[in-house]
Amino acid sequence: MEKTVLLSKSVKELAEICESQPKYVAKQIYGFLADGKDFDEMTSLKKEFREELKAEYIANPVEILEVFKGKLGTKKYLFKLLDGNLIEGVYMPHDYGDTLCLSTQVGCRMMCTFCASCLDGLLRNLTTAEMLGQVIAVNRDNGGTAKQRAITNLVLMGSGEPFDNYDNVLGFLDAVSNGDGINVSERNISLSTSGLTDKIKDFADSGHKVTLSISLHAPFDELRSKLMPVNKRYPIAELVKAARYYFDKTGRRVIFEYTLIKGENDSDACAKELARLTKGFPSHVNLIRLNEVKERSHIAPSEDATNEFLKKLENYGVSATIRKSLGNDVEGACGQLRRRYIEGK
């Protein structure tokens, strides 16, 4: 018999499972799950009832398979799912709080030419519980509980396109921000999309108010379509219009992610056009020096060249920064660790 995962269940749903128990038990279990506890650790429950739960249910569908520690406290997590699939996450300590970068899909079908996540294509979407399970597992692994979290910020920037798994991602946002659970405020959550403009507009209307990060990576349609095939369906003009719509609806500044690739998107013309596209509404450009992938032919610019591009943007009046690189020493590109693990078997 296939067991049911409890992690994403609401207190109301848990109450139906716990009909034979006192009314407070459902909320107790919800809290235990948010702390990352398995059934044997829920010692305030009657032993017979714990055994019943173990026989029919699974607490967390995400298992930490390996942890690779990098410099400055960075940790790359390799997770195993119940069906044997593998996903990744990165824990990054910062002065302003500790961040988890989590995955929303096993693989990806966006086929961006500089990314390792889509080398094997899209295998499947992650469930709400599998996304929440990453947060719970890493929070506990770093000594946190639901009330005293070791993770303060979340970024949906791991493997996968969040808006290609729209309904489950919305379910995850509801679950992870629940005050009775791990309670991560949406103000501390960022979601990165390659630019599915219809979903951006739907999301703007959904009532959620996370920070929206748009993977732009090129300011011209011809160039962006080469780097990101999704641009053929959702061209830049539509994407910028959707970004403005998101700001108008939520009041949240939009972040444009821009990975610099030597000799491809780092010209003076690119800087000037990027400034034109982002002018006129609150936005910020997050420059990222390419994290090279051995299966790809793209080359990272030098640090000096990256700084020069930043100066060009600033001279045009663009709010921009260079994203601090964390995780490169532990195969920080999404999909790299998973692929090496599979190939090594």
Image: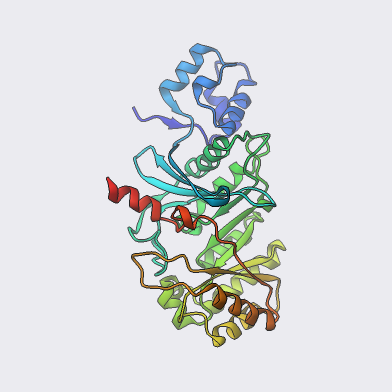
The answer to which of 40 and 304 lies nearer the viewer is 304
Q: Where the N terminus falls, by quadrant?
A: top left
How far across and how far down the image is residue 343, in percent?
28, 51
Protein image colouring: rainbow
Q: Residue at x 34, y 53 (%)?
A: 339
The answer to which of 133 and 175 lies nearer the viewer is 133
44, above or below 228, in the image = above
Disc tally is 0
How far across and how far down the image is residue 51, in percent?
46, 16
Q: Residue at x 39, y 66 (%)?
A: 111
Q: Residue at x 57, y 16 (%)?
A: 45
How far across and how far down the image is residue 16, in percent?
55, 25
23, above or below 122, in the image = above
Q: Which residue occupies the extreme bottom position in the image? A: 269
The answer to which of 288 and 282 lies nearer the viewer is 288
How far across and how far down the image is residue 150, in percent?
63, 40
Q: Residue at x 44, y 27 (%)?
A: 57
38, above or below 205, in the image = above
Q: Is residue 212 left or right of residue 281?
A: left
Q: Where the C terminus falls, by quadrant?
A: top left
Q: Give the image quarter of residue 179.
A: top right
The answer to which of 263 and 180 lies nearer the viewer is 263
